């Protein structure tokens, strides 16, 4: 995508991009061999959840970026790009979606919106059949998500 506007140092521009597409998992974890990439058990079965859970990290390149998340030739020369995202997730398979920002859900509970209040260097989206609890410690409120039946922390 090309923007036909020159920017001077300190200037900015707002772009609204509606994006949809499919994830090419060959791009994720560039250091893996084809055999390792196709091994869905990964030696420990920790991530063997199928489609019940979702975890998309910036490494999956699941959203447009100005700078690739990793330099495969020289990883130490990878750069960070801070962007102010607004995220809309339509008809997810998972009941609960978690992402950075203030969450909102429409009344049919089939569309989730996230509005981060500051620029992020990457965007992660997590989904599953989670329960949640708010815990307040002094002036800080924590929102904890956990798998149903795994509430081991409230009795602490």
Image: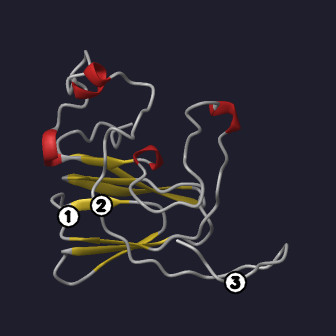
Check whether the beta carbons of the residues at disc 3 and disc 1 lie within 8 A of each other: no
Mark drawn on residue 5: 3
Q: Quadrant of residue 2?
A: bottom right
Mark drawn on residue 97: 2
CA–CA distance in space, label 2 to label 3: 36 Å
Residue 24, above or below 125: above
Q: Position of residue 136 (x, y in %)?
A: 49, 57
Mark drawn on residue 132: none
Q: Quadrant of residue 99?
A: bottom left
Label 1 belongs to which residue?
92
Residue drawn where x is 43% and y is 51% of the image: 61
Farthest-out residue, top: 43
* Relative horizontal placement of residue 125, taking residue 92 as reference (left or right): right
CA–CA distance in space, label 2 to label 1: 8 Å
Farthest-out residue, right: 9
Residue 112, above or below 47: below
Residue drawn where x is 69% and y is 83% of the image: 5
Q: Position of residue 67 (x, y in %)?
A: 60, 54
- The mark that comes first in sequence, 2 or 1, is 1
Query: Please, which colouring scheme is shown?
Result: secondary structure
Total marks drawn? 3
Check whether the beta carbons of the residues at disc 2 and disc 1 lie within 8 A of each other: yes
**Could you say which is closer to the camera, residue 102 or residue 78?**
78
* Relative horizontal placement of residue 76, taking residue 83 as reference (left or right): right
**Element assignment for label 2:** strand
Q: Nearer the viewer, mark 2 or mark 3?
A: 3
CA–CA distance in space, label 3 to label 1: 36 Å
Q: Position of residue 94 (x, y in %)?
A: 18, 57
Instruction: Count neighbours of disc 2 (C-alpha within 10 A) and say few if under 14, some if 14 to 19, many if 20 or more.
Output: many
């Amino acid at each position: 995508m090309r923007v036909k506007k020159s920017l001077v140092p300190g200037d900015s521009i707002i772009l609204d991009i509606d994006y949809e597409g499919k994830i090419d998992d060959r791009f994720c974890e560039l250091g893996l061999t084809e055999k390792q990439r196709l091994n869905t058990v990964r030696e420990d079965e920790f991530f063997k959840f199928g489609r019940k859970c979702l975890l998309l990290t910036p490494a999956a390149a699941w959203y447009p970026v100005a700078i690739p998340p990793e330099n495969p030739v020289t990883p130490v020369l990878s750069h960070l790009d801070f962007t102010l995202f607004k995220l809309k997730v339509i008809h997810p398979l998972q009941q609960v979606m978690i992402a950075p920002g203030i969450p909102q859900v429409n009344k049919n509970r089939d569309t989730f919106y996230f509005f981060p209040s500051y620029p992020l260097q990457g965007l992660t989206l997590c989904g599953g059949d989670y329960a949640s609890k708010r815990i307040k410690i002094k002036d800080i409120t924590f929102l904890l998500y956990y798998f149903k039946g795994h509430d081991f922390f409230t009795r602490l």
